[in-house]
Amino acid sequence: MKDTEEIELQDVELFAEYLEFQMLPGIVQTAAQALLPGVPGKAEWTPAKFSLDLEYPGKIETVEFVRSNGKRAVIGGEMVPPFYNFLDLEKRNPHPPLVTYDVFDMGSEMILPKPIKVEYKEVLADPPEWAKFAVDKFGAECVTFHSLGIDPGTLDWPISKSRKIFEDILQAVDVPVIIGCSGNKKKDVEMFTELAAISESEVLMLSAADKATWEEVIPLAVKYDHNCLLWTSLDLNNQIKMNKDALELGLPSNRIVMDPTCATLGYGFEYSFSIYQRMRVAGLLGETDLAYPISGGTTNAWGAREAWMSEKIAPEWGLRQYRGPIWEIVNALCLCIVGLDLAMMFHPVAARAVKNIISEFFSEVPKVLEEKGYTDWVNANLKR
């Protein structure tokens, strides 16, 4: 009877890093006998097959950024979840996430984290040179021009100054340029009106239309054939409504990019992660109202004190020159694995690191799998 003895513990808490339960053959046999009376010593098992349904009937819209010189960048077009290229070599996502480098019009007047100032110190006062530096030294395939100086709360520059800087940036680089804004709704609409018109020979992007400006900004994107970033605040229903409103105003579906808000790692990031994931999965499953590329301001990672706080104040956190870029890298990569198509990034080394990692995930892994024959093994097992 030793094998049937029981020990009962009361008011006990069990802590373990690893816990494993093993069912001994004798126990399985005893259980089978209890379940199958009259068939002593014999257990019957019902054959079962495990199937993994990986069909995604939806497809994400493809959005292009095109310069008049022919240089372009493409996002979207996904048919399977991010980096699922190993599942079916005939059904791969066509375009990796795109990284765009931030350029500010008032960089020399801004209070910036030291790691970023160190990288851009020679060009902070010259936005066109800043953009060129990002392209030439760090391989930027796209830049985002943020026109913060027009805001009455900062320098209250006239729109004409923003226009001049923008024109100079277009001359300085041959890659697509995203037209960012200041956050002041009135001045932003005025700025978009000017900059969209002078770049009508290009297909760029107005960033962004939100609940306060969409009725004015979206028609500008329609008129001058630009892409338009539709920004909402972590709400699927609001994003769906804005997408529908944009279509009703005449914006083609291949000109829509969504931005549901990128929270900072450690400060609500899990909400962004969940929303991005739900949007992408919904689009792939056939929800056409959410079948658009997704953008994220991963620059927001620098809003976390863990990213910018000096090691003199928090020495236990390590060197800020590494900590800040890593914080931004993690923000971007975490969103990339759930559907991010366009990562707006600040620190150039962080941006380059994300580009390199994406390239490896997107291209090299499938190549290695093919060369070593692993894909045949994976596909064969998935089809069993």
Image (cartoon, rainbow, N blue to C red):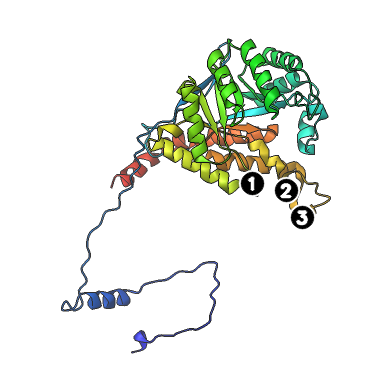
Please state which amino acid type lies under the numbered disc 2.
Answer: Glu
Q: Are marks 3 and 2 in contact (CB under 8 Å)?
A: no
Q: Give the distance between the C-alpha atoms of the residues marked 3 and 2, in whole angstroms.
A: 11 Å
Pointer 1 or 3: first along the chain: 1
Q: Position of residue 53 (x, y in %)?
A: 33, 45
Question: At numbered mark 2, what does the secondary structure look like: helix, strand or loop?
Answer: helix
Q: Which residue is mark 2?
A: 306
Q: Secondary structure at mark 1?
A: loop
Q: Nearer the viewer, residue 122 or 210?
A: 210
Q: Earlier in the sequence, mark 1 or mark 2?
A: 1
- Does the image show residue 13? yes
What residue did someone put label 3 on? 316
What is the number of the mark on residue 265?
1
The answer to whether mark 1 and mark 3 are in CB contact below 8 A is: no
Residue 104: where, in percent of width, then height?
73, 26
Q: Mark 1: give few (<14), some (14-19) or many (20+) Cα within 10 Å.
A: many
Neighbor class of circle 2 (other Cα within 10 Å; few <14, some 14-19, many 20+) is some
- Marks 1/2: CA–CA distance: 9 Å
Measuring 54% from the left and 70% from the top, which residue is drawn there? 16
90 lies above or below 187: below
Name which residue lies at 16% across and 76% down: 39
- Determine the residue positioned at 26% across, 54% down: 49
The residue located at (60%, 22%) in the rendering is 206
Q: Amino acid at mark 1?
A: Leu
Distance CA(mark 1)–CA(mark 3): 18 Å
Asked whether residue 72 appears in the rendered view, the answer is: no
Q: Quadrant of residue 102?
A: top right
